[in-house]
Image (cartoon, helix red, strand yellow):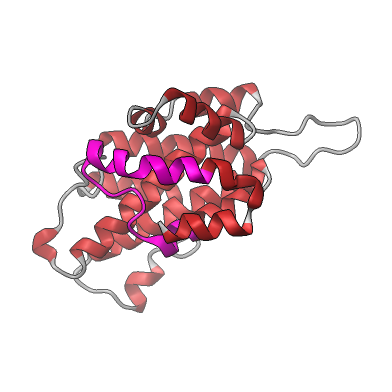
Amino acid sequence: MQALEVLAAVLPQAKPILNDLLAIAPKFTQVHGTPLYDNDQLHLGISYELAKQTDRGAAIIGAAFVERYLELLLKQRFSVNDEITDSLFKGTQPLGTFSAKTALAYAIGVIGPKAFEEITTIRKIRNDFAHSITPTLNSFTELTFKSDSIRDRCANLWTPDDFADAIPPDTLQRIYDSHGSEARARFMIAVGRLALSFHFEHALTGDNSDSHAPLHLL
């Protein structure tokens, strides 16, 4: 829990909701069998980085966290990890895109169909923001998590609903309110759940090829 306490100190405006999260973490662990905040450093990094971003920045950076830890899981499945392997994930190479990494992860059993669907939705939200034109005076409407198209995509995310089952409704509403919109909160929950799950799996399996299996929660 140290990460949440540090985050509360550096972001005073977030302290009330972080206190809520500190209170519900044991409940989440009991329901889902997996500690929500086992890796303080990673959770602190994700939470702090996304909390200070605009909607556009949060969407792009949040998706990047998921992509990064998915890439680490994929590399564990390779029999050789060297510069040649790393080059496959660069630029225009076969695994250089988020969609290619996601497809391969599903094809070789690193993730299941639910995780594939969730990552695809996150990637589409990222792309919507990344490809939107920066507004100029009286010319364009800025894309935000309150925009209809983004709100609809976020409503299709399933991990926030899974998360919501573990906490009281009033606490969930405060989480939504703290992010400025329910859609942004749902996106943050989905990104955090996936990134942390991938990180846990990567840390647990290490280099032991016999321990590799699709994530049971995803």
| Residue 143: quarter of image | top right
Residue 62 vs 92, above or below: the answer is: above
User: Which residues are the magenta region?
Assistant: 18-44
Say which quadrant the N terminus sits in. Answer: bottom left
Asked if residue 213 lies in the magenta stretch, the reply is: no
At a point 8% along the width and 62% down the height, the residue shown is 210
At a point 50% along the width and 48% down the height, the residue shown is 63
Q: Main secondary structure of the magenta part?
A: helix
Q: Is residue 94 visible?
A: no
| Left or right of residue 137, residue 218 in this image | left
Q: Is residue 27 visible?
A: yes
| Residue 79: quarter of image | bottom left
At a point 38% along the width and 44% down the height, the residue shown is 193
Residue 13 vs 132, above or below: the answer is: below
| Left or right of residue 167, residue 106 in this image | left
Residue 178 vs 1, above or below: the answer is: above
Q: Residue furthest left?
A: 210
| Residue 120: quarter of image | top left
Which residue occupies the foreground of this view, 16 or 119?
16
Residue 4 in the image, given as x and y percentages of width and height: 48, 54
Residue 172 in the image, given as x and y percentages of width and height: 47, 29
Which residue occupies the foreground of this view, 181 or 9?
9
Say which quadrant the C terminus sits in. Answer: top left
